[in-house]
Structure formats: structure tokens, C-alpha cells
Amino acid sequence: MTFEPIDFDLLHPSPLIIVISGPSGVGKDAVLQLMKQRKLPMHFVVTMTSRPRRENEQEGVDYFFVSCLQFEEMIAQDRLVEYAKVYDDYKGIPRSQIDEALASGKDVVLRLDVQGAAKIRALYPEAILVFLIPSSHAEWLQRLKERKTESLESLRLRVETARQEIKRIHEFDYLVVNSEGQLAQTVDAIQSIIIGEHHRVVHRKVVK
């Protein structure tokens, strides 16, 4: 007696799109840096920005840095999956970044603000959205001050922006606290989320 074989390969999940978001200064960059250091098998999408490069930032690693004019030309040519103007500077994801990442067969990780996360969810409903928060307002404000890149008016703007962003927490799938000195635990939590999502039946293809 012979049986028609079952193609279990069809049940293997497709790569995930994971968005790491949260208020400015919550530690998104530090989280992604540790994920990279752990050499996780993921494609980390690099955001493009029109703001000036800070002293400790590297081109093509932290961001792709372009002028406002170059950014606006990319908008006109529809070469961006999503973009927004934040604090008078543009930030966005080049379409080629997403295409190449998905083609690699690896999970795709994006670092985005709340507006960007919403746009990715609209384009990719299966995307997993993770919202980072600090353990307290005082801790978060201190982090922003220690960066020494913010004027008093800029700090006020970031606090108000964060207040509005938190009102949209219901748009996210997971909430992770990134406490001071607990970066490894934060990344552990995100890795656990990704592992769990890979085992969800909803991400499997239908076997016919």
C-alpha cells in the first residue's frame, strides 16, 4: 500500500517582519545593536534619514544619510515603502531594503517610529509590532538629557510626542519594558516573542 506523501515543507513558516518601535530615547538602537552582536539570523533593515550624522554614527550601519533634496527625490520616484517627517527631518525605508530582505529568506527587523510601524502594518498585515517603553518617566527623561543632543524645546516636543504615541499602544502586538541596565533581558524577551511567533499556526502556509 502506498500513500500520497505529505509535503511538510509547506508548513514551514515564511520569514517574519518584526518592527521595533517606541518613544524617542527608549533604547531602540541599543536593542538592535545587541541583537546584531548576538549574530541572530536576521536581516536588519537600515533606515534612511535626512538629519545630520551624529559623531558616533556610521553610514549604512546606523542610517543611510542623505540630504532633504535627495530624500524628496526618492519620495517623488516612489522608492520608499514608508516615510515621515519627524522633528523637521525625514526618516523612511527604501523599498529596495524590504525587497532584498524578504528575498534573503531571513526574518526582517525594522526600527521605526509609531507612524512608520502603522504604515508597515498596513502594507504587511502579518508584521509583528513590538513597542518598547522605559521603566519610568524619570529614567526615560534622564536618558534623553544624557544624549546632550536636545534643546529644552526639543525635549518638550519629544515628551509630548511620546504622550501621543502611547495612546496608540493598542496598535501593537507586544509591549516590552527596556529598563536601565537590563538591555540583555529586553533582547531576551524580544527573541522569545520571535521564537513564539515562528511556532504559531497562523504563519503556516495552507497544505492542499
Image (spheres, grey):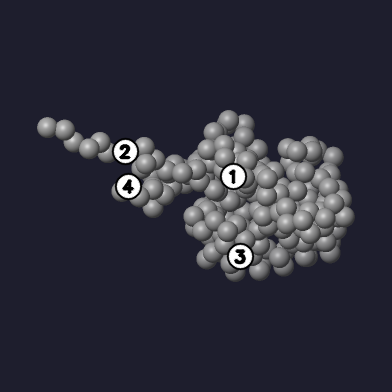
Question: Which badge, 3 or 2, comes first in the chain's sequence?
Answer: 2
Q: Which residue is mark 3?
A: 166
Q: Quadrant of residue 186?
A: top right
Q: State the CA–CA distance, disc 1 to disc 2.
A: 29 Å
Q: Tell me residue 134's x, y (percent).
A: 62, 54
The secondary element bearing badge 3 is classed as helix
Q: Quadrant of residue 81?
A: bottom right
Which disc number belongs to residue 7? 2
Q: State the CA–CA distance, disc 1 to disc 3.
A: 21 Å
The image shows residue 191, relative to residue 91, as above or below, that is: above
Q: Residues within 10 Å of mark 4 (few under 14, many from 20)?
A: few
Viewer-closest of 3 and 8: 3
Circles 4 and 2: CB atoms closer than 8 Å: yes
The image shows residue 158, relative to residue 51, as above or below, that is: below
Viewer-closest of 158 and 127: 127
Residue lying at 57% horizontally and 37% vertically, measured from the top left: 104
Q: Which residue is mark 4?
A: 207
Q: Tell me residue 189's x, y (percent).
A: 50, 44
